[in-house]
Amino acid sequence: MKVLRVIGGSARGLRLESVPGESTRPITDRVKEALFNIIGQDIVAASFLDLFAGTGAVAIEALSRGAAFARLIDAHPLAVRTIRANLKKTRLADRAEVVQRDAFAVLGGAADRRFDYVYIAPPQYKGLWKKALLTLDARPDWLQSDAWVIVQIHPVEAEPVELKNLEAFDRRQYGSTMLMFYIPREQPGGTEDDRRPDPRP
């Protein structure tokens, strides 16, 4: 079984528990490090929504690196139990909210806050990433004006998605993992200052 750990910030080096069984696909250290190198210091004081949280590793990494708040959503009891254990172990539970519920049901409900980052990494090969992205596209009230939506998939799952309120601005591939990045489309009357810079070199 792959060893999971926090690779940066206040909880750096702490090992995380894995969800029993084969229902989750933990992010590798290489991909996680690359992701947070791209985000950089913008994670400090940010709010983070992890829609298919699994072990909680991505949101916990965000909290460890200074995010102000993370909401971790997963429908599976074993995943939720693992997330709570990992938050306790890393002493980050006071800035996190764990929700045992279907991610699509949450997105379809009233948005109670706007997030700076939304991470989408559902089970592979079921088209769930596309469904989640389209659901979020239809509900931009979950997003800050300069939010990033980040999708983690296997490269073979990649396909164009027609979006109204979001637009793709980057994608990165690390072996069998692809990260795709989206931002809200600029609204009439907005300025470039309202949006985070493109991280591409």
Image: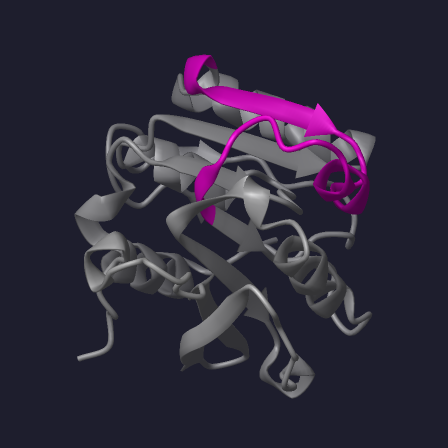
**As drawn, is 44 to the left or to the right of 30?**
left
Query: Which residue is more in the foreground, 44 or 168?
Result: 168
Residue at screen point 71% across, 69% down: 130
Magenta highlight on residue 105: yes
Residue 156 vs 131, above or below: the answer is below
What is the residue that sits farthest to the top in this orientation?
94
Residue 157: name its quadrant.
Answer: bottom right
Q: Which residues are magenta?
A: 94-117
Magenta highlight on residue 65: no
Query: Which residue is more in the foreground, 7 or 177?
Result: 177
Residue 121 vs 68, above or below: the answer is below
- Total numbered badges shown on the rendered structure: 0
**As drawn, is 117 to the left or to the right of 158?**
left
Query: Which residue is more in the foreground, 109 or 20?
Result: 109
Q: Position of residue 49 (x, y in %)?
A: 53, 40
Residue at screen point 39% across, 49% down: 145
Q: Position of residue 187 (x, y in %)?
A: 42, 61
Which quadrant holds the C terminus?
A: bottom left
Q: Position of residue 192 (x, y in %)?
A: 22, 63
Q: Is residue 69 visible?
A: yes
Q: Is residue 2 visible?
A: no
Q: Position of residue 94 (x, y in %)?
A: 44, 12
Residue 45: name its quadrant.
Answer: top left
Query: Which residue is more in the foreground, 167 or 74?
Result: 167
Residue 37 vs 85, above or below: the answer is below
